[in-house]
């Protein structure tokens, strides 16, 4: 009998990392380590070939999916001047992997007109390289739309086996 273990990488590439003759079924569960483990491995394949050539295969999928959400500085702050001119757009390039949706909010450095901040409408722009996260907020005044502060983006991952959410913040300057 021969036991073989393969790592199945993203895209379907197989990499054999263990192959030994085995004297019985207990060898297959002996705690073999994959010294070439990488973040793009999606599952493992266990292949056991018997003396007569019969083969048994089992694919072991990962329970956890890797997610990433990291902002790439600097963050950009612009104001859309059409209409009332109170729409502010906050953007940052980002590394985004396995994120289902994004939310955002903004907090002023100090209160402006009795307001300390507000939630906005967030989006992931995939047409850029690298990807961009965007937060649009319609303020009550041009002064608020131009103000400095901190944008907070939260990436939501709805797969029950991942970390759930990842929050990142970026500081933006006042528009003068």
Image: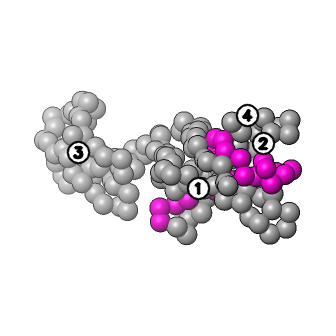
- The residue under label 3 is 36
Residue pictured at 60% horizontal, 47% vertical = 172
Q: Could you say which quadrant of the image residue 153 lies in?
A: top right
How far apart are the two marked residues, 3 and 2, measured between alpha carbons?
46 Å
Numbered label attached to residue 35: none
Q: What stretch is highlighted in magenta?
A: 129-151
- The residue under label 1 is 76
Residue 150 belongs to magenta span: yes
- The residue under label 4 is 110
| Number of other residues with Cα within 10 Å of mark 4, as a class: few under 14, some 14 to 19, many 20 or more | few
Q: Locate the N terminus and report the quarter of the image it occupies.
A: top left
Residue pictured at 73% horizontal, 34% vertical = 110
Q: Vertical placement of 120 versus 79: above or below?
A: above
Q: Which of marks 3 and 4 is in front?
A: 4
Q: Is residue 166 visible?
A: yes
Q: Locate the C terminus and report the quarter of the image it occupies.
A: bottom right
Q: Which of marks 2 and 4 is in front?
A: 4
Left or right, 103 with reference to 23: right
Q: Describe the element under mark 2 as helix, strand or loop.
A: strand
């Amino acid at each position: 009998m021969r036991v073989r273990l393969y790592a199945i990488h993203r895209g379907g590439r197989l990499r054999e990392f263990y192959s030994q003759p085995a004297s019985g079924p207990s060898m297959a569960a002996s705690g073999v380590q994959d010294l070439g483990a990488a973040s793009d491995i999606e599952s493992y394949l266990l292949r056991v070939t018997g003396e007569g050539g019969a083969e048994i295969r089992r694919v072991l999928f990962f329970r956890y999916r890797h997610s990433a959400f990291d902002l790439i500085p600097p963050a950009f702050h612009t104001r859309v001047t059409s209409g009332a001119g109170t729409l502010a757009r906050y953007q940052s390039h980002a590394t985004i992997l396995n994120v289902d949706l994004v939310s955002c909010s903004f907090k002023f450095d100090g209160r402006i007109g009795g307001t300390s901040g507000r939630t906005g409408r967030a989006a992931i722009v995939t047409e850029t390289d690298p990807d961009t996260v965007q937060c649009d907020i319609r303020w009550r005044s041009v002064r608020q739309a131009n103000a400095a502060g901190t944008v907070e983006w939260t990436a939501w991952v709805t797969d029950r086996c991942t970390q759930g959410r990842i929050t990142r913040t970026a500081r933006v300057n006042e528009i003068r």
